[in-house]
Image (tube, coloured by chain):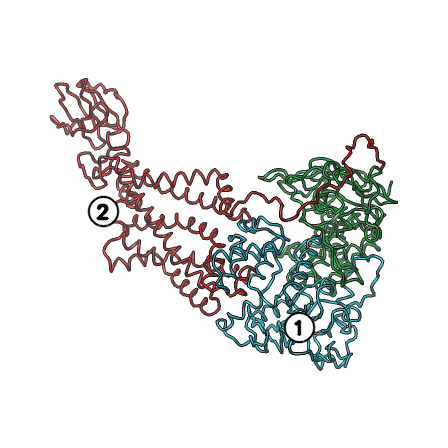
Amino acid sequence: MSKNNKDCLLKVDGLKKYFPMNKGLVKAVDDVSFSINRGETLGLVGESGCGKSTTARTIIRLYNPDSGSIELDGFELASLSQKRLMPHRKKMQMIFQDPYSSLNGRMTVRDIINEPISVHTKLNKNDTKNKINDLLERVGLNAGHANRYPHEFSGGQRQRIGIARALAANPDFIICDEPISALDVSIQAQVVNMLEELQEEFGLTYLFIAHDLSMVRHISNQMGVMYLGRIVEIGESSEIYREPKHPYTQALLGANPVPDPRIVRQKLKIIGDIPSPLNIPSGCRFRTRCPHAMDICSKEEPQLTGSGRQVACHLHT
Amino acid sequence: MDNTLLSIRNLHTSFFTHVGEVKAVQNVSYDVRRGEILGVVGESGSGKSVSYMSCMRLLQEPGRIMGGDVQFKGESLLSKTNRQMRNIRGNRMSMIFQNPMTSLNAVLKIGDQITEPLREHKNMSRAEAKREAISLLERVQIPDAEKRLSAYPHEFSGGMRQRVLIAMAIACRPDLIIADEPTTALDVTIQSQILELMKDLQQDLGTSIVFITHDLGVIAETCSRVVVMYGSMVMEEAPVDDIFHRPAHPYTEGLLRSIPKPGMEDKRLSPIPGSPPVQLSPPPGCPFAPRCNYAMNICRRRLPEFTKIGENHRSACWLLSGHAPSNNFRRENI
Amino acid sequence: MTDTINNNTFSSDDWDNGPKEEFLKSENLAPSMTYWQDVGRRLRGNIPAMVSAAVIILLILAAVLGPSFSSHSYEDQELSFANIPPIINLYQITPGRYVYMHRNLRLIETTSGGDLIETVGMEKEDLFKKKMFYDIDGTRIILDYSQRPFKLTDVDGKPLETWKKTGPGGYLLGTDALGRDLFVRTLYGARISLLVALIATLANFLIGVIYGGIAGLAGGRTDNIMMRIVDIISTIPLTLYVILIMVVLDSGFLSIIIALGSVYWVNMARIVRGQILALKEQEFVLAARTIGTSTMRVLFQHLLPNSMGVIIVTATMLIPSAIFIESFLSFIGLGVSAPMASWGTLCSESLDSIRTFPYQLFTPALAICITMFAFNFLGDGLRDALDPKLRK
């Protein structure tokens, strides 16, 4: 991506994360590169097991990457020890999928939101209290909720608490790992709108992971499609949505049900299941399910090509 | 009205918990017609699943049916004995559950699980049942059907397991299949395959399918008629096109505004404010009133009655009542 | 559907837009109930568990305070009053003079209330006829042991009538073969058992929880090594430890305490490790790690509080087996040494005379049973209360 380096907040290059298993090596993230501009959102989509969550967790260093670089705001994070990483931690935070397991049920809302504040700042008692109250107000709750326990809240409210916790450290970059997929439809929109408002207000940068393509299209400027540990297509999300180039992107978009019975989308039928990540097909990973598979697809792994909009497919080289 | 297969009338179901009675289904009435795919859409706690557990008489303690009737092919299901119900379940009506991982017995071979309803309800011999099982697996497009009979569930992927469950559900050629969120646990490409399969089977067999889901996209792609539930009640019942293009209930309208509109993804969403109701002590009046943009005083005082809007289209909302003054909602939607 | 409602049934303001709801700010949440309040509520509803808890509290009170209410101490021997059962038959000889016929052919004079005074001296014994002759205040009576059951007769051979049945004064549960008060000794046994329970619990919490917590949290190679150590410890029988420790230290009881304290935490360590491994992948723990919370804080603020339910249940369930191990070791002679009493030694001492004086076995055995039942029921109740999902 030939963007101006100045407003590029996160640059991931050649990221790899392998998990050794009894039966072999699982290449969960295999050479993933992308960058996100400050104040923008990159959506990462793909089916379960495609490595999108592992990518996110490696970027935030819940996992140590096997190789590649993670550059956040000009600092290289991939090789830092957990100790050296500490001062950078507050710049990136994460919002999790399951509002039930993402909050410690034995802690009050105040203690939950206080955790990043106490780790990363030296606020006195009074300032901390004010900050927690401000955060609660900002996510649509109120100060009176601070002494309550998570199980007293609905799923949507719990997700708001999770957002308040992520904001507490004043981060620049937030990873949203399927933040709405566990919520009811009417609540999803509330959370998405709040994320958009917070982005405008604080100039936040998001990595938004989801499997709901229309929501990703709605919230993100850029969009990356992952399949078996690799990005197969990446670019402006409106463009990808309008004209998907990679057969897998086409299939994914075609399979996404449209909430309008009058629109009958033409579907690219793909057959079968995702291959086991232990047994990745040779050449192009998608060739076993691809209706356009050619000879070359089994021999040579296609690389992402193009500027701006990049596709890894032999049909587009 | 010979066209009616299942008719639910004034169904009430409650759960008696230590904190009190939770009314999970209140005064629910509608029909499932022969050969249709009916979508039942609602959020968690709307009573969409409980109403079918009640119909199938599969309600677990502390749940209890408090009133109403369910007629299946003209016969009341609520007055049947357990033995008669067992003969209907899996035979005349069958269910497909959400989680394909836990719906199959992990220690039994797939073949044994598919032949079970056949031998139970159709009195087939072992060989007949096996032949039938192979043709069922082929029908749901499982390759190598004969070999797969002796496989165990863990050897199947999620999508394949859901196919096996569908094969089991259609084994006895039931009149009605109730599919409770059958694709929620699956990936989109697999979901699309399963939805296609179910639509094909429905065409071939003429079975009625009730599709319980929270996903409006799935509803739009598969169903011909839709029942919208909220707060344990039916809010609206209409053909699928009306639901998406002429929603006659503010809740339906709100749901549609909560998801990105096809072709207008850049627009801000306008979500329904507030949280789903807690059913422990529901206020009088419409359950949606506290979150409704158009709520009037009467909405908080009295339950709205159904108003008929068109052929097969009715909605329970005071805005549509003949007594209501002219209002924006009615002007924009009806 | 036709609208049959008459216009008159509506009030005039029905069709006005009412006040808009203020969401989230005013939303009524259920009254605040912490996890532990909720657990307490569920536990109070469980009658067997509550009865068990009451039994355990009574047992603790009795063990701590009980002995001070008795005039006897656990080691006071009164050989002349040995093997007195908890209920004795009194015979009235003359008004004011009462005797009790002991099973080992002695007459013991008592007060009218059953207090034991002294052994009555025999006048003469006819070994051939198997009769013993006594003279009490001029009244002659005969203890006839020629045939069972032995009986007390007057000079004409007419059996005396039992005047009344009563407890031997001061000895609530009778005495043992050395004339020691069984009641006090049983309470001392309870002290020993509860001490063992305390030690086992302490070992579980101080060593087991922390060991398991660290193993689970560290994972990988550290976890592997730590768990292999646990495996080795748990394969060596506890009896062997006790004997080995007894070689170094003399006192049996101290050996048991040391043995229990040093190895009894392995089950807890395994269970806590399993819990931690499962919780470690939960999103709230991941969240803490992305925040940069220190490892120790993750362990003590997130992981252990969420494992506390399982820890408490496990500790409660391990107590009865610890008590039983101590009783068993004492029973086979590896436990507390005389004159100290534990339920196990009480059982073993009573075995010598089980046919003649079965009550001596009955008391400590019943004490063991009740205690084990109480802890097990309480453990079950706690498990149900702490995690309703586990209920089966």
Residue at 71 percent of width and 74 percent of height: A232
Question: What residue type is disc 1 on?
Answer: Asn
User: How far from the left and from the top, in percent, is residue C68?
Assistant: 25, 37
Q: Secondary structure at mark 2?
A: loop
Residue that label 2 marks = C338
The residues bearing labels 1 and 2 have C-alpha atoms spaced at a distance of: 82 Å
Q: Quadrant of the N terminus of chain A?
A: bottom right
Rendered colour, chain C: red
Figure quadrant of the C terminus of chain A: bottom right
In the picture, measured across the screen, residue A238 lies left or right of residue C209, that is right
What colour denotes chain B?
green
| Residue picked out by circle 1 | A37
- Quadrant in which residue A64 is drawn: bottom right
Q: Which of the two residues, C6 or C147, is positioned nearer the viewer here?
A: C6
Q: How busy is the neighbourhood of tag 2: few (under 14 within 10 Å), some, or many (20 plus)?
A: few
B58 relative to A16, above or below: above
Q: Position of residue A89 (x, y in %)?
A: 54, 68
Q: Is residue A103 left or right of residue A283?
A: left
Indicate whether C171 appears above or below A173: above
B141 and B128: which is toward the camera: B141
Q: Residues within 10 Å of mark 1 (few under 14, many from 20)?
A: many
In the image, residue A266 sits, relative to residue C3, either above or below, namely below
Question: Of C279 and A108, which appears nearest the observer?
Answer: A108
Q: Dot 1 falls on which chain? A: A
Residue C265 rendering spot, x and y as whole percentages = 39, 57
Colour cyan, chain: A
